[in-house]
Structures are given as C-alpha cells and as structure tokens.
Amino acid sequence: MSKEIRLLNADEIEVRVQSVKSNGCILLLYKDARVDMRILDETYGPTGWQREHQLINNNLFCTISIWDDEKKQWIKKQDVGVESYTEKEKGQASDSFKRAGFNVGIGRELYTAPFIWVNLQAGEVKDKGDKSYINPHLHFRVKSIAYNDKREIEKLDIVDNNNVVRFSMGKSVTPNYSEKYKQNIQNKESNNSSNGLTCEKCGKKISEKVAEFSTSKFKKKLCMDCQKTFTRR
C-alpha cells in the first residue's frame, strides 16, 4: 500500500480562534470530518476504506481501516475523541474520526503551522471584566498555503471576512481598513448593543439569536461562553 495522502488545500482548512486578549487573538488551523472522508475516497476509493467506533473505558475510539491489496488485509489506525460542548456523542465520534485521520496521514502538515497571532482593532474586541471577547461578525479563513518537500507549511496567508490580510507567515502585517469597513463594524456593534439583551450570568451583551437559542435550551439568557459552562454541569 504505497498511495500517498495529498496535502490539504487552502479551502479545506478551517480557522478557529483559540484565545482572545484585549489587543489580539491566537488562531488555530484544523480540518473537519468531511475533508477526511473526501480524501479517503479520493485516495483509496469509496469501498477501499471503512470506519468503526467503539467505547473503551467510557471513551469513544474510532478505527479507520484501509485495504492493502498487496498484503490482502485491512491496515488499521485508531484514536480517541474528545467531546464537544454540544451534541456530546456526535462530537466525540467526529473528533475521534478526525484524530484517526491524522494517524492515517490526513492533515498531518497542520502540526507544522506557525504560531498565529492576529492584532485586533477597535470594534473587533470587547473587554468584560478580566475577559476579552472577539466581535461575532469577525471571521477568518486561509487564503493561500504552500508546503516544502518535507510536507511542512512554508507559506500561509490568512484573511478576514472582508478579505483583509490579517496574517502572513514570516511577515509583519498591518491591516489596511477602509472607512466603510470601520463604519460597518461600528454599525454592527451598535445594532447588537441596542437590543438590551444581556447574559443572566456574566452580564455580557448578547444577540437576539443567541438569547432565543439559550432560552429554548437552558431556560435562561446565556452568552456562548456561559452556555458552555452550563452544559458541563
């Protein structure tokens, strides 16, 4: 079985905010389960691989088996999942599958990603007590990525949802914002704060959608962070 797993394309890589400070945030790169399934299909064919889940010591494991036509046997890779804050079982199943995919070789190049720090501007971050929160309208994506012959990331550009470059590997980035962009941020902030809705636990302002979801699920108006704490109980 000598087939090589291809490297991830830019549009197959997701960007997640790991932590937020008053002047910026740390980003992480990750893949979702659909990418693993697509690459397994591309490389081994829809019938050339299979997955199974099993519970071991109350932990959900996933095993990916790949058919080796030369050895006439299934080659197996296994890993354990970590539950998500919502949909516990589904979260563990998806996470264990993605982790097993790393063992197969899918997305392993993401381990070579640099430390990704993005400076945040006024209107993109808010402080509440000793915590900082990123503007929910701000999102990031990988615009371009390149690898060296060792399958390591050697070029990486990340932009926000206004296509402004926020991180470029090995370069110092100063975002070039238009006045229209700044005004849009201010308008969105104003709209969010004008509804008068706040988290019943921490007092943070929340949107109508967050309040509606939280009320239906927890019978309380909670921000996203407090919802996570609530579900852990």
Image: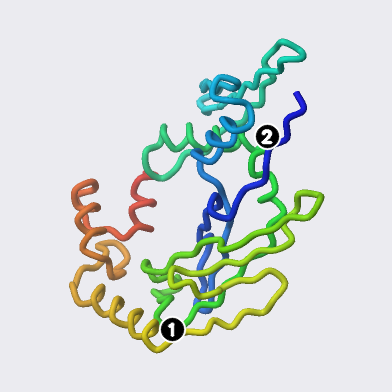
Give the SS element for disc 1: loop
The image position of residue 209, as x and y in percent, is 23, 59
Amino acid type at circle 2 is: Asn
Q: Quadrant of the C terminus?
A: top left
* Quarter of the image where one finds residue 165: bottom right
Q: Residue at x 65, y 59 (%)?
A: 145
Instruction: Say left or right for 47 vs 124.
Output: right
The image position of residue 50, as x and y in percent, is 56, 21
Q: Which residue is mark 2?
A: 103
Instruction: Report the colour scheme.
Output: rainbow
Residue farthest along the top direction in this orientation:
72
The image position of residue 143, as x and y in percent, is 56, 63
Would you place residue 3 above or below residue 206 in this image? above
Q: Nearer the viewer, residue 57 or 100?
A: 100
The image position of residue 214, as x and y in percent, is 24, 53
Whole-number angstrom distance, CA of label 1 to CA of label 2: 41 Å
Residue farthest along the right direction in this orientation:
149
* Quarter of the image where one finds residue 170: bottom right
Q: Quadrant of the N terminus?
A: top right
Instruction: Say left or right for 221 vs 186.
Output: left
Q: Which residue is mark 1?
A: 122
Q: Residue at x 54, y 24 (%)?
A: 46
Q: Earlier in the sequence, mark 1 or mark 2?
A: 2
Q: Looking at the image, is mark 1 or mark 2 nearer the viewer? A: 2
